[in-house]
DNA sequence: AGCCGAATCGGAGAGAGTCTCCATATAGCC
DNA sequence: GGCTATATGGAGACTCTCTCCGATTCGGCT
């Protein structure tokens, strides 16, 4: 069990504190947004600021630790999509949707994710992994002639991220989010009276 | 001369300070980003923090005062587009481009613009004006069957804003920006073998 | 020219946030 | 039970936004 290697590295009280901080942070970020202060998380968890910062040197590290858990859910969804969807175009569409939901696990998450794509941060590896997966799914769609070849996985990732940022995690932005996702797929332009029409 | 009404409201030293602060802020925001601190702008302008904050109660107010100038340029561009472009679809495309450039007058500007669309801020009126214009140009394209009817001017505005946010004002994001603008217009989906093709 | 009230100014400091440092406390091996 | 590596907490350094008010300056009036 790989748990043991972690267990041996950390004293039991430290393990407990770390887990408790994560749980408290998850709730705080979820109920409010990623803008809740580190100090208030420390207070909520009943630990000193020093303890919080030793476990997670900054907010990005804390977010990264939480996103690892969410990332597992995203991977699971990916497998589900790739297994259950034979149409590579539809698979890409579903993936973009799943991607958007993942990026909105917490209100305000898109900002640190974008920053992590520009400069090194604890979130950077996760971003790169997600981009690589997007690249693969996009390529499959391109190879079947279902997606245009002018864009990369990174572009689709940024498109989904931009939509998540613009629409926010609240219910208020849901309409905007749906419209923007549709635009991401189809564009604002009316197609030249296609003979078969769009399904 | 409308200048006089302003002149009578403000003492001459205050007028000079206000103008000087604006000029300094324009350079600071331009060379760096909207994240430069208010205090450092005050220092650069050689005035006290109190003076800065009396003229502009917060950073949004300072940005709004600067954007009014940029807004004139955008209006000019709008007239140019509407006069010179008979194709309403092409006009919309050009407008989205102009919109994106305006939103990137300063690095980091998209964030306060988005915030101003959600809660009242000195930037809110400008945002609403730009959205209304976008609505008009979009409707013209829709009426000619050149743009889909599923979206509003607000959606296009947010789309352009999201792209500006994701790609940033630096040259580094230029490729991403161009690809995303193309996606905004055409979508990622490969069109069903259009007979006439895309022009 | 010189006076005087109103307008304006500067900067100290309150309040909030991030993050560091280190004296103190504790787990857990012997 | 003692001992040492590990972990803790909270004071405080630093930054940023914004407020308050005594000191200063403008500019109309005499």
Image: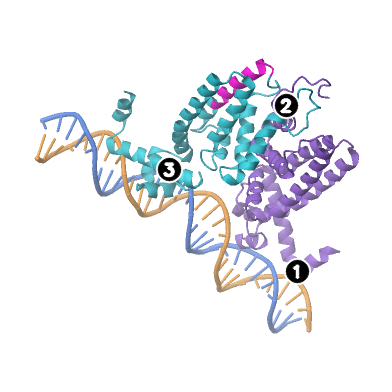
Chain colours: A purple, B cyan, C orange, D blue
Residue A133 point in image, percent of width and height = 79, 47
Residue shown at the point (57%, 21%) measured from the top left: B85
Residue A137 point in image, percent of width and height = 81, 43
Both on one chain, marks 2 and 1? Answer: no
Q: CA distance from mark 2 to mark 3?
A: 44 Å
Rendered image: mark on residue A185: none
Q: CA distance from mark 2 to mark 1?
A: 60 Å
Q: CA distance from mark 3 to mark 1?
A: 50 Å
Rendered image: mark on residue A9: 1
Give the quadrant of the N terminus of chain B: top left
Asked whether residue B66 is drawn in magenta, I would say no
Note whether B83 is above or below C23 in the view shown: above
Rendered image: mark on residue B198: 2
Asked whether the beta carbons under mark 2 and mark 3 sit within 8 Å of each other, the answer is no
Residue B172 point in image, percent of width and height = 60, 46
Q: Which residues are magenta?
A: B130-145
User: Can residue B10 be seen by looking at this rendering?
Assistant: yes
Magenta span dominant secondary structure: helix
Q: Residues within 10 Å of mark 3 (few under 14, many from 20)?
A: many
Q: Residues within 10 Å of mark 1 (few under 14, many from 20)?
A: few
Chain label for disc 3: B
């Amino acid at each position: 069990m790989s748990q043991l290697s972690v267990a041996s590295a950390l004293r039991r009280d430290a393990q407990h504190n770390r887990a408790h901080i994560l749980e408290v942070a998850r709730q705080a970020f979820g109920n409010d947004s990623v803008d809740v202060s580190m100090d208030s998380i420390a207070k909520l968890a009943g630990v000193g600021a020093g303890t919080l910062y030793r476990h997670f040197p900054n907010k990005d590290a804390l977010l990264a630790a939480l996103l690892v858990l969410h990332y597992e859910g995203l991977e699971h969804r990916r497998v589900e999509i790739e297994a259950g969807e034979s149409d590579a175009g539809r698979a890409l569409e579903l993936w973009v949707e799943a991607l958007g939901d993942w990026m909105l696990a917490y209100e305000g998450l898109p900002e640190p994710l974008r920053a992590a794509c520009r400069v090194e941060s604890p979130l950077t590896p996760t971003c790169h992994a997600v981009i690589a997966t997007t690249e693969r799914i996009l390529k499959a769609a391109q190879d079947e002639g279902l997606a245009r070849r002018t864009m990369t996985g990174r572009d689709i990732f940024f498109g989904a991220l931009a939509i998540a940022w613009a629409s926010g995690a609240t219910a208020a932005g849901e309409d905007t989010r749906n419209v923007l996702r549709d635009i991401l797929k189809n564009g604002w332009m009316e197609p030249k009276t296609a003979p078969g029409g769009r399904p």
